[in-house]
Image (cartoon, rainbow, N blue to C red):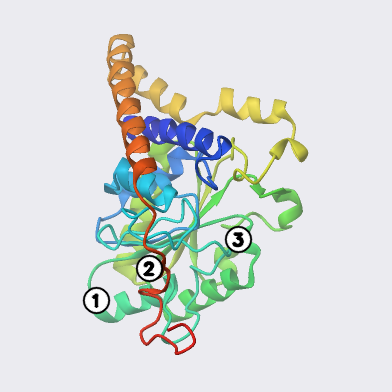
Amino acid sequence: MYKTMTLLNTMDKILYDAQRQGRISFYMTSYGEEATHIGSAAALSPDDLVYGQYRETGVLMWRGYTLNQFMNQCYGNSEDGGLGKQMPVHYGSKELNFVTISSPLSTQMPQVKPHLLSAVGSAYVYKRAKNGKCVIVYFGDGAASEGDAHAAFNFAATLECPIIFFCRNNGYAISTPTHEQYRGDGIAGRGPAYGMNAIRVDGNDILAVFNATKAAREFTVAQNKPIILEAMTYRVGHHSTSDDSSAYRSLSEVEKWEKHDNPIQRLRFLLESRGWWNEEKQTSWLSDARKQVSSVMKAFASAEKQPKPVWQEMFSGVYKEMPLHIK
């Protein structure tokens, strides 16, 4: 867990800088929220279906998405699994049971139409199939204000589906702080109103996230009922490379969280207190990390050299039967 969080952090720094240099068009970092990714992903079965919002890179990394795959997707080159049809960081992997990300908030949550399944619809299919799997859908505190989120909660509760609603409550919905976003007791407080169980957890404590997700999964699979899991964390980075968070929050606020409630540092201190980690291991790991940084740079250079997809690919896999005007 510690090493995966560190690798995620390293890759974020490289790709954020790449966007600033104009080498890719867009990026979103996971600074401060690494524990919500890795802690929850580690508690799931690899067969469980994941619907991400757009900041769940660590979930894919834990499941085995490679550095080359991350880089190729962000470049939208000919090796990208989506063949350039998506913005950077809008990952997807059928092999890793990770549904391709969509930018609009909350569209991943409800069953929109009978023939277009999102998270709740997929969970209902799993219930009918009695396959012992569950669905987890990630979303932020801001996405929880969308109508689709409320529809999803109601669908899941009334249809009694095996789904975990995982809310990353990171303090801000882009530029809107949570105190302006809702008046109730966070997102977990909505659970009882919809007839659902709910858990609130320290999202910067990776073992707390792991244990809460593990318990949530056991409950939802055994009971065929939904559950809300709200992880209280903090978005240290900007919302995305299109955002300057200094316009709506102070640098001292960010520094306070980064210094005193850093999930990576907290895990390191825990490992040291249990005698599982020490300065010698840290030094050895830093050496390994530098090698991994080198491998990231190799993946980065390789992705940059790949040609763009053939332009006709933008239409393939979009329509079952291609309309005449597109032909």
In the picture, the disc for residue 237 is none
Element under disc 1:
loop
> Along the line of sight, which residue is nearer the eye, 213 or 309?
309
Q: Which residue is mark 1?
A: 130
- Give the quadrant of the C terminus: bottom left
Instruction: Name which of mark 3 and mark 1 comes first in the sequence.
Output: 1
Q: Which residue is mark 3?
A: 143
2 or 1: mark nearer the eye: 2
Real-space Cα distance between discs 2 and 1? 38 Å
The residue most toward the left is 131
Left or right for 88, reference 170 = left
Do tag 3 and tag 1 residues touch (Cβ < 8 Å)? no
Identify which residue is drawn at 40% across, 49% down.
212
Real-space Cα distance between discs 3 and 1? 30 Å
> Along the line of sight, which residue is nearer the eye, 17 or 132?
17
Identify which residue is drawn at 42% across, 47% down.
57
Vertical placement of residue 139 versus 15, above or below: below
3 or 1: mark nearer the eye: 3
Q: Residues within 10 Å of mark 2 (few under 14, many from 20)?
A: some
The answer to whether one can see residue 94 in this image is: yes
Horizontal and vertical percent for residue 159? Answer: 43, 81
> Along the line of sight, which residue is nearer the eye, 121 or 327?
327
